[in-house]
Each structure stands twice: as C-alpha cells, then as structure tokens.
Image (cartoon, helix red, strand yellow):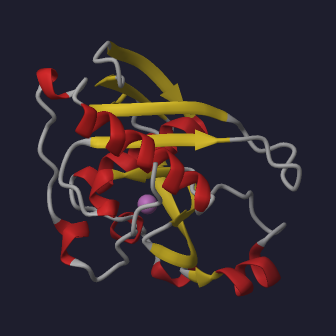
C-alpha cells in the first residue's frame, strides 16, 4: 500500500470528469490496489472521504469512512464504504446547511447546503451492487465525493462564500456556534 499525492484546488485534474470503471476491471489488481491506496491516503490525512480524481486518477471510485473521534463524541460514524460508479439521486426537496472541509482545500471550512436524503446506486469493491438510502451526514459525504467525480468541489456548492474560513479561525470563531459537520 502507498500514500498517494493529493491534488489541491487549482490543479486541473480536480475539474475533470471521471470515467466509469468497467465491471470486469473491478477485480483487477490495479483497481484493488488503487482502492487500498485511497483508503490508506484518506486515513493518513484524516479525511472523511476521498475520490480518485483527488489522487490524479480519472476513474469513478470514492472511499468514505468516519471513525469515532473522542474529541467529537456525538459526531456520526460511517463504516468504511467503497463506491464505484456511484449514481446519487435526491430523495427530497429539502437541503440542510453544514460545514465541510476537503483534503484538496487544506485547512479550510465552509457551509454547504446538501440534500438531506439521497438514493445511492453503486458497486462495491467486489463488484456487488449497492442500492441504499442515505440521510443527513452520510448523505452529505456521499454528495461531496460524488461531486469530486464530476469535477466539482464544495466551494462550487456554497451559497455564501462569507462562511469560507481557515481552520484556525474556524476553531476560534465558529466552533460551538454552529454544528460541526466535516
Ligand atoms: Ni473533498
């Protein structure tokens, strides 16, 4: 396994659209190694998720994981989830504002509106179909990662750029004033 280099905002690769992974390429050693490396990279940098475009690979693969953090005992947990060729469909008209960060936009946070419930259709790393309904924080992370695979980053979704803040200032002025939603 290897820790991969993460593209930062401004790198053109973040604005490209990823290609679907053909079904017969999912079990290949190359695809499986990429998934393992993406998981390792996400964990190394304490991300909630990582999309292949962020590690310079234009394939529709994303990984998500949120572990229990003793600093945020009330924050939701998401078990390790590997998404291949995800299709995300809103299940509601309702959006909710929440804080997001991104490994490609280091040390920043911003408030982003997201659908509160989505249907997720995808394949897992064994190629098995995933078809689930996700709500709230899980739905938010799915939308964030799916956006990456379509060349979008969270700042594109912000309604008001005045909430865009550096992490140190976020800790100082915003934490506690609003719900934490990374
Ligand atoms: Ni991101």
**Picture coordinates of residue 74 (x, y %)?**
84, 43
**Picture coordinates of residue 45 (x, y %)?**
59, 63
Q: Is residue 154 above or below residue 174?
A: above
* Identity of the residue drawn at 30% across and 13% down: 129
* Identity of the residue drawn at 29% across and 32% down: 84
Q: Quadrant of the C terminus?
A: bottom right
Image side of residue 78 versus residue 30, left or right: right
Question: Between residues 72 and 39, which one lies in front from this camera angle?
Answer: 39
Image quarter of residue 33: top left
Image side of residue 72 versus residue 181, left or right: right
**Picture coordinates of residue 36 (x, y %)?**
43, 41
Residue 142: tell me if it is visible: yes
Image quarter of residue 133: top left
**Picture coordinates of residue 128 (x, y %)?**
31, 13
* Identity of the residue drawn at 54% across and 80% down: 164
Image side of residue 132 versus residue 177, left or right: left
Residue 95: tell me if it is visible: no
- Count of marks placed on residues: 0
């Amino acid at each position: 396994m290897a820790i991969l280099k993460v593209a930062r905002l401004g790198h053109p690769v973040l604005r490209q659209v990823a290609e679907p992974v053909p079904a017969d390429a999912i079990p290949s050693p190359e695809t499986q190694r990429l998934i393992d490396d993406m998981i390792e990279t996400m964990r190394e940098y304490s991300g909630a998720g990582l999309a292949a475009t962020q590690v310079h690979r234009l394939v529709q693969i994303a990984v998500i994981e949120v572990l229990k953090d003793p600093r945020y005992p009330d924050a939701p947990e998401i078990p390790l989830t590997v998404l291949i060729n995800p299709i995300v469909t809103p299940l509601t008209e309702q959006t909710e504002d929440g804080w997001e960060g991104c490994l490609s936009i280091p040390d920043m946070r911003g408030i982003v509106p997201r659908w509160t419930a989505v249907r997720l259709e995808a394949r897992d790393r064994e190629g098995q179909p995933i078809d689930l309904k996700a709500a709230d924080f899980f739905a938010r992370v799915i939308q964030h990662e799916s956006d990456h695979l379509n060349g979008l980053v969270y700042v594109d979704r912000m309604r008001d750029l005045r909430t865009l803040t550096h992490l140190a200032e976020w800790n100082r002025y915003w934490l506690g004033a609003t719900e934490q939603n990374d």
